[in-house]
Amino acid sequence: MPPKLKLLIWRALHDALPTGVNLEKRGVANNSTCVHCGAPETTEHLFLHCPFASQAWDLTPLKNPFVSTSFGSFYSALEASTLDICLPPTGCRVNIFFWIVWSLWITRNQLLFESRHISVSETITKALAGAREWALT
């Protein structure tokens, strides 16, 4: 896994990502809402419970569906992801969880900072492409 993904996952597991709720706790931001749906933006919301994230997980070609809203914590979702198997013809032989999380993070940041909306299907396509590229290196 690339260092950028390791750092993102580590920060998510330690609740150290600059999500809306975390920034508001630190007095950095006044708005703690999700850019996709307007709910309070926590790590779990951003990657698991937001309707945008839920749609992304639903579109991910996995052998067994990954129902992101059924997990109460990012850690439990990460643990469960070790059993995920991507279906052919994706060409992914790595744990796609890390790449989906990365893609959701990038999509969120592009919408927040650049007002650039990226569709759910494009988000998944970028995650799968990133995973395939990394597996080839």
Image (spheres, grey):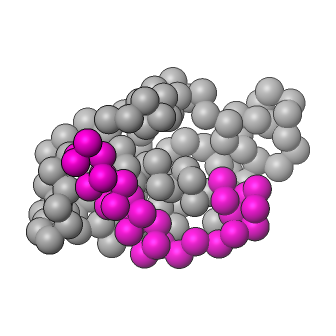
Residue range of the region highlighted in magenta in the rendering: 109-137
Q: Is residue 47 found inside the magenta-colored segment of the image?
A: no
Nearer to us in this view, 56 or 134? 134
Residue at 26% in and 36% down: 79
Image side of residue 110 versus residue 128, left or right: right
Residue at position x 32%, y 61% in the image: 128
Would residue 54 be seen by someone viewing this image from the given angle?
A: no
- Residue 74 in the image: state x and y as whole percent: 41, 39
Q: What is the x, y in percent for residue 55?
A: 42, 70
Query: Residue 37: horizontal and vertical position, in percent?
Result: 65, 66
What percent of the width, then of the height, locates residue 58? 33, 69
Q: Quadrant of the C terminus?
A: top left
| Quarter residue 75 falls in | top left
Question: Which residue is most to the front?
Answer: 137
- Name the residue rendered at 23%, 46% in the picture: 135
Q: Which residue is at a point 32% across and 35% down the rendered structure image? A: 1
Main secondary structure type of the part rendered in magenta: helix
Answer with left or right where residue 36 lies relative to residue 78: right
Q: How many labels does the image show?
A: 0
Q: In this view, does 137 lie to the left or right of 39?
A: left
Check if residue 128 falls in the magenta segment: yes
Asked if 23 appears above or below 33 in the picture, the reply is: above
Q: Which of 120 and 132 is in front in this view?
A: 132
| Residue 102 visible within the image | yes
Residue closest to the eye, 38 or 98 = 98
